[in-house]
Each structure stands twice: as C-alpha cells, then as structure tokens.
Amino acid sequence: MPARNPYPTAAAFMPDRLTMSALREAVQHCEGCPLYANATQAVFGEGKLGSDVMLVGETPGDQEDLAGAPFVGPAGKLLDRALDEAGIDRSKTYVTNAVKHFKWRSRGARRIHDKPTWTEQMACRPWVEAEIALVKPRALVLMGATAAQSLLGKSFRVTQNRGTPLDSDLAELVTATIHPSAVLRSDDREAMFAGLVADLRIAR
Ligand code: SF4
C-alpha cells in the first residue's frame, strides 16, 4: 500500500477572508507540502488587483527566495526585457509562481533549482487560484510546464500549445509560453527570446 501523504495541502492554511493581505500573511505559515522546510520564506505574487495581465511562473529561484519577491533574479530581468519588447508594462501586471516555496538541491556551495513534484504542485494550487480570483486578470499567461500543468492539467504540453488562446475559464484569455529561464539555458537564446516575445504579444 502506498505511504499516506502526511502533508495536508495549502487548503488547510487558507485564511477565512480572502484578501491579498490575508493571503500574504497566511502563506508564510503554510506547511501544505514539504517545501517550506528548506526555503527561506514563501514568495507570494506582486502587482495590483485588477491588473489586466497576470503572469505565472514555476517556483521562486535562489534570489527570489532570499528577497521574498518573484522574478527578481536573472529570469526576472529577462522577463522584463521580453515584456518590454512585447509592449507590456510590467508595472501593470501581476506576477507570481505556481509553487510558493523554493525547491532546491545542493551543488557544492550553490543551491540549484529542483522541479516540484506533481503532488507539490497540486498542494500549492489553492494559493494561485486565490490570486487569480482576487486579481481577476483579463489575460493569464502561464510560463513553463509547471505553471501550465498546475492550472490546466498534467497532460498539457507547452511545446505543442504555446502562443495561442487556450480553452479555459480561468480568464478571458489564457495562454502558455516557455519559462524565461528556458531562454537562459538555451544554446540559441536569440531564437528562444524571440519566441517568448511573440507568445507574450498575444496577451498584449
Ligand atoms: S510550496 Fe506551497 S503548499 Fe508547499 S509549503 Fe509552500 S506554500 Fe505550502
């Protein structure tokens, strides 16, 4: 018999009143999956309620974990450039991640990003669902497989369905693209970056 999952999911830590400030406070106490134990803090989304565009990435990275803010590291800087080229003002977007605690493994003195498991993604989903419900974006852009699968299902493939409007009730326009960190890892950064910008233009 498979071992019982001892973690209750984020649903057990949601505040009674769904306001952004209550969510921000509550997420810091979340023990809905094992990831809280090795992270510095939970990293919640940033941006204004009513933002037209909401961007969802995978998890905070090393710098985001330390800063407590999403997309402040190298991938965030690249995202800023891509948004700018796509004609989207980042200050008018809401930016968050599907999973709120940094998952990592050691490589020497460095902390290397590790992909959250499906169970961890599903455990964390109540937070991003609450953010969508409060922000009410007109366009929801899911960046990378973790964000897209967390919200659209495990069988979703970014490579096959990126840059196009998707069938979803989560927002007026739901679309998917690659994660900015995929551009940084690529041997052909120029082409990957151009593809990211083209996908983001759909949201504009
Ligand atoms: S990753 Fe999500 S579900 Fe897991 S402990 Fe952190 S906030 Fe809670």
Image (cartoon, grey):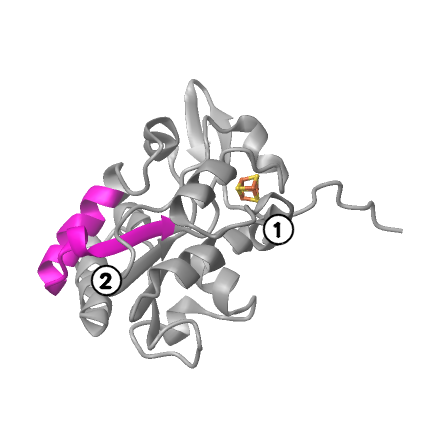
User: Considering only vertical position in the picture, is 129 above or below 24?
Assistant: below
State the residue in front, 115 or 26: 26
Magenta highlight on residue 82: yes
State the residue in front, 80 or 169: 169
Q: Earlier in the sequence, mark 1 or mark 2?
A: 1
Question: Where is mark 2, residue-wise?
Answer: 196
Residue at the spot x=26%, y=63% of the render?
53
- Residue 153 placed where, x, y %? 54, 68
Element assignment for label 2: helix
**Ligand 1 contact, mark 2 (Cβ < 8 Å):** no
* Classed neighbour count for the residue bearing mark 1: other residues with Cα under 10 Å, few (<14), some (14–19), many (≥20): some
Q: Is residue 90 something that shows in the picture?
A: yes
* Classed neighbour count for the residue bearing mark 2: other residues with Cα under 10 Å, few (<14), some (14–19), many (≥20): many
Element assignment for label 1: helix
Q: Indicate the quadrant containing the C terminus: top left, top right, bottom left or bottom right.
A: bottom left
Q: Is residue 102 something that shows in the picture?
A: no
User: Which amino acid, by three-letter code, is at mark 2?
Assistant: Leu
Question: Where is mark 1, residue-wise?
Answer: 11
Magenta highlight on residue 1: no
Q: For the stretch drawn in magenta, what is the main secondary structure?
A: helix
Name of the residue lying farthest toward the top: 109
Is label 1 in contact with label 2 (beta carbons under 8 Å)? Answer: no
* Magenta region, residue range: 76-96
Residue at the spot x=56%, y=47% of the render?
14
In which quadrant of the rendered view does residue 158 lie?
bottom left
User: Considering only vertical position in the picture, is 124 above or below 111?
Assistant: below
> Is 81 placed left or right of 55 in the picture?
left
- Residue 137 placed where, x, y %? 31, 66
